[in-house]
Image (tube, rainbow, N blue to C red):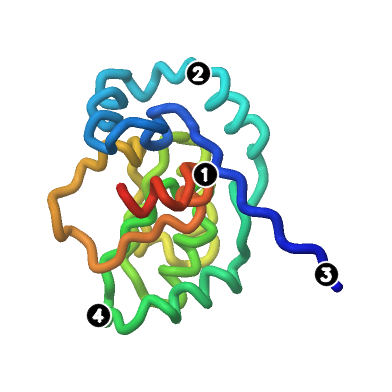
């Protein structure tokens, strides 16, 4: 007999990283946009970035997981436009660019993660297919219907799946 799998913890990071518990995404987006992204002083966010520095991913999963989830996403256009929200150092972004021939817009609040992704994309020959943007996932700077697929593999884990789906 095996032990039951415990439920996945739902970590709620500050507004810079996603909706706060009890607040709508719109309220959180407004709060996040009032805080300059260069002035991240929340100790939880600072600790998160420090703890994850140098790791290939900031949440559970693997390249194989990303590939499997991509297969489950269904048919996509030949060069899909994909938004990878909370991309971290971009492991999923790289897989999406390589396997789906996607034009990926990789969004994260932490510039060192975006810089790491830019270097990795160039090294893997997909630098032309990945554009990085430093912004909060709570305040997306894109008009509706800008993308064929919105990817939130790691960020959904961090803000909680229920919150991610509502957002």
Local SS, label 4: loop
* Residue closest to the eye, 127 or 109: 109
| Relative height, residue 121 to residue 48 (above, below) | below
**Residue mark closest to the camera, 1 vs 4:** 1
Rounded to the nearest angstrom, the CA distance separating label 1 from label 2 is 16 Å
According to the picture, the residue beneath numbered tag 3 turns out to be 2
| Relative height, residue 103 to residue 166 (above, below) | below
Q: Crowding near pointer 1: few (<14 within 10 Å), some, many (20+)? A: many
According to the picture, the residue beneath numbered tag 1 turns out to be 158
According to the picture, the residue beneath numbered tag 2 turns out to be 42
Residues at marks 1 and 3 touching, judged by CB atoms closer than 8 Å: no
Q: Position of 75 compared to 5: left or right? A: left
Q: Residue at x 52, y 75 (%)?
A: 67
Q: Position of 152 compared to 9: left or right? A: left
Rounded to the nearest angstrom, the CA distance separating label 3 from label 2 is 40 Å
Rounded to the nearest angstrom, the CA distance separating label 1 from label 4 is 29 Å
| Relative height, residue 92 to residue 132 (above, below) | below
Q: Position of residue 102 (x, y in %)?
A: 34, 70
Q: Disc 3 or 4, which lies upstream in sequence?
A: 3
Q: Crowding near pointer 3: few (<14 within 10 Å), some, many (20+)? A: few
Q: Disc 2 or 4, which lies upstream in sequence?
A: 2
Rounded to the nearest angstrom, the CA distance separating label 1 from label 3 is 27 Å
Q: Quadrant of residue 130?
A: bottom left
Q: Position of residue 43 (x, y in %)?
A: 56, 18
């Amino acid at each position: 007999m095996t032990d039951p799998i415990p439920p996945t913890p739902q970590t709620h990071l500050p507004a810079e990283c996603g909706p706060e518990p009890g607040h709508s995404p719109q309220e959180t987006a407004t709060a996040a946009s009032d805080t300059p992204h260069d002035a991240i002083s929340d100790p939880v966010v600072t600790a998160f970035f420090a703890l994850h520095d140098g790791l290939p991913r900031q949440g559970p999963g693997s390249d194989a997981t990303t590939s499997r989830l991509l297969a489950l996403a269904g048919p996509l256009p030949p060069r899909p436009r994909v938004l990878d929200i909370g991309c971290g150092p971009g492991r999923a972004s790289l897989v999406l660019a390589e396997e789906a021939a996607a034009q990926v817009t990789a969004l994260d609040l932490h510039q060192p993660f975006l810089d790491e992704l830019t270097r990795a994309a160039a090294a893997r020959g997909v630098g032309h297919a990945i554009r990085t943007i430093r912004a909060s996932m709570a305040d997306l700077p894109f008009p509706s219907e800008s993308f064929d697929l919105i990817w939130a593999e790691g960020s959904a884990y961090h803000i909680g799946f229920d919150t991610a789906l509502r957002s």
